[in-house]
Image: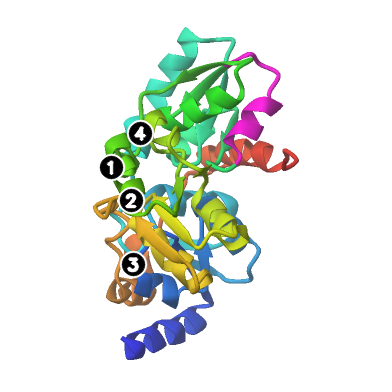
């Protein structure tokens, strides 16, 4: 494996490429990456590099976001078929029809969505800043797409606005149940419970902290607690343990695995570097400009 990683880094240097890996990727892929993190965080950081090529170890919408923010760079998704079921739960025509039903509502779209859907939105949000984004808007009615669970999280924090959720969800987070959380708490009574806001509301109700993946990394580093139950895709346990080797992390549910996030392997990365044309992600310029405007509006909002 060390030889394979060395070959990857030689090819990265030869191609003037930067290797990105999402927090849910396989441990060996994360360890080989130049930058790891949340999906949009990765795209933003890559846009600030001098690299001519971005190798994105993630899923399709993430690579699209990188292409939106870095139109001058070639964006390569090593496993081109790696998609996101939640992002696929809404498309452009569906959103256009929904907007007609609610003409006075602002459209807030989670970054876990296609470029086409972002382009039809007023503003984007992440799981970390969704509440702040919705609060910043003047409209009292908010169409929130595609994640109904993140919409529920926003609604409880911004009760003065009417949140109209699309019926989408992340299958990996949706499978976590309250009974499984309670069972894990009995098994590890001293552990703090962290869950992602993509989890269903009744699971969120049982959590000590509700955080994005980057938020979980920050929270655990700053917390005095030494044991944590983690309610998100199990790939996050690797960076959590690397960042906090003196602390213990337990998956609430060991089968919280995103099959798409686990597709990419080290041989896939090397193959993509040698033949990038086969897996280059492109966003048509008219869509790119509109989607970028929705992302830029989000980035202009002051952080809490």
Range shown magenta: 129-141
Q: Earlier in the sequence, mark 1 or mark 3?
A: 3
- Asked whether residue 131 is drawn in magenta, I would say yes
Q: CA distance from mark 4 to mark 3?
A: 23 Å
Residue 83 seen in the figure: no
Quadrant of the image occupied by residue 273? bottom left
Q: Which residue is mark 3?
A: 26
Vertical side of 29 occupied by 233: above or below: above
In the rendered structure, find residue 252 and report the number of the disc placed on it: 2
Q: Earlier in the sequence, mark 3 or mark 2?
A: 3
In the rendered structure, find residue 169 and report the number of the disc placed on it: 4
Crowd class of label 3 (few under 14; some 14 to 19; many from 20; radius 10 Å): many
Element carrying mark 2: loop
Quadrant of the image occupied by residue 291? top right
Quadrant of the image occupied by residue 56? bottom left
Element carrying mark 1: helix
Q: Are marks 4 and 1 in contact (CB under 8 Å)?
A: no
Residue at 48% across / 27% down in the picture?
Answer: 151
Crowd class of label 1 (few under 14; some 14 to 19; many from 20; radius 10 Å): some
Residue 179 seen in the figure: yes
Vertical side of 270 occupied by 177: above or below: above
Which residue is most to the bottom? 3
Name the foreground residue: 51 vs 176.
Answer: 176
Residue at 40% across / 88% down in the picture?
Answer: 6
């Amino acid at each position: 494996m060390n030889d394979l990683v060395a070959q990857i880094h030689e090819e990265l240097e030869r191609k003037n490429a930067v290797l990105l890996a999402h927090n849910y990727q396989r441990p060996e892929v994360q360890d080989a990456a130049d930058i790891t993190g949340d999906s949009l965080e990765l795209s933003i950081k890559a846009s600030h590099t001098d690299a001519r090529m971005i190798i994105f170890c993630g899923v399709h919408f993430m690579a699209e976001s990188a292409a939106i923010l870095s139109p001058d760079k070639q964006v390569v998704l090593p496993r081109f078929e790696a998609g996101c079921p939640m992002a696929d739960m809404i498309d452009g025509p569906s959103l256009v029809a929904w907007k007609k039903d609610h003409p006075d509502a602002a459209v807030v779209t989670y970054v876990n969505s296609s470029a086409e859907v972002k382009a039809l939105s007023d503003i984007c949000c992440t799981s970390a800043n969704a509440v702040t984004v919705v609060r910043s808007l003047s409209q009292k009615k908010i169409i929130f797409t595609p994640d109904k669970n993140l919409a529920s999280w926003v609604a409880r924090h911004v009760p003065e606005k009417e949140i109209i959720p699309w019926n989408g969800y992340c299958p990996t987070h949706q499978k976590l149940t309250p009974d499984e959380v309670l069972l894990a708490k009995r098994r590890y009574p001293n552990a703090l419970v962290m869950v992602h806001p993509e989890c269903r509301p009744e699971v969120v109700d049982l959590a000590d902290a509700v955080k994005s993946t980057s938020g979980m990394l920050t929270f655990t580093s700053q917390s005095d607690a030494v044991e944590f139950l983690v309610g998100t895709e199990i790939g996050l346990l690797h960076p959590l343990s690397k960042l906090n080797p003196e602390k213990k992390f337990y998956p609430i549910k060991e089968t919280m695995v995103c099959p798409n996030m686990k597709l990419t392997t080290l041989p896939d990365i090397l193959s993509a570097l040698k033949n990038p044309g086969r897996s280059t992600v492109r966003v048509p310029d008219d869509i790119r400009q509109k989607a970028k405007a929705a992302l830029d509006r989000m980035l202009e909002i002051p952080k809490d």
